[in-house]
Image (tube, rainbow, N blue to C red):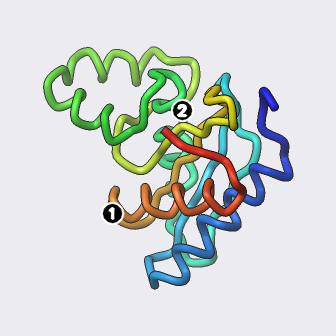
Amino acid sequence: MNSLSLTQAQAVIAGALAAARHKGYKPMGVVVVDAAAQAIAFAREDGASALRLDIAHGKAGAAIGMGVNSRALAARAKDMPAFFGTIATNALHPFIPQTGAVLITNAQGDVVGAVGASGGTGDEDEEIVIAGIAAVGLNHL
């Protein structure tokens, strides 16, 4: 498998949202993108605020665009705010370097996409996307 299917993307989202409900987190938005940062699937829970999908997409886009999870990008952005600000304003896809997105890999270790969430703390967002990936039997970086 060199790409994510719609069925897999929807299952990642379902797993992430199930984890959020299990933990009692605030309503979430979750977006799965492919290796070109194009949205495959997304969902915004009832009660989630209006920007949740935009933020989740930006986190996933940043992770796939830079080839690293968004936790690492958030740390890097603190040291180079001008660089990351320039990327965010010039990228052709959403780019938000904040914790809450991870890369999705296949069994061979190839990056096939990313998933981002928004609605809780960055740690909560990251926790649920990892749970969603695990629910499908895929891996993450």
Q: Position of residue 79 (x, y in %)?
A: 14, 25
The residue at the point 48 percent across, 23 percent down is 67
The residue at the point 67 percent across, 48 percent down is 138
The residue singled out by tag 1 in the image is 121
| Callout 1 crowding tier (Cα within 10 Å): few <14, some 14–19, many ≥20 | some
What is the three-letter code of the residue carrying label 2? Gly
Q: How many marks?
A: 2
Horizontal placement of 136 versus 17: left or right?
Answer: right
The residue singled out by tag 2 in the image is 61
Above or below, 24 relative to 80: below
What is the three-letter code of the residue carrying label 1? Thr
The CA distance from mark 1 to mark 2 is 18 Å
Horizontal placement of 99 versus 31: left or right?
Answer: left
Above or below, 69 relative to 100: above
Q: Position of residue 46 (x, y in %)?
A: 63, 77
Secondary element at tag 1: loop
Above or below, 80 relative to 18: above
Q: Earlier in the sequence, mark 1 or mark 2?
A: 2
Secondary element at tag 2: helix
| Callout 2 crowding tier (Cα within 10 Å): few <14, some 14–19, many ≥20 | many
Q: Position of residue 75 (x, y in %)?
A: 22, 35
Horizontal placement of 65 versus 6: left or right?
Answer: left
- Examine the image and state in which quarter residue 35 appears: top right
Q: Position of residue 20 (x, y in %)?
A: 52, 74
Q: Nearer the viewer, residue 106 or 121?
A: 106
- Examine the image and state in which quarter residue 82 appears: top left
Above or below, 14 relative to 61: below
The residue at the point 46 percent across, 84 percent down is 24
**Mark 1 and 2 residues: CB-CB less than 8 Å, in contact?**
no
> On the rendered image, what quadrant is the N terminus found in?
top right
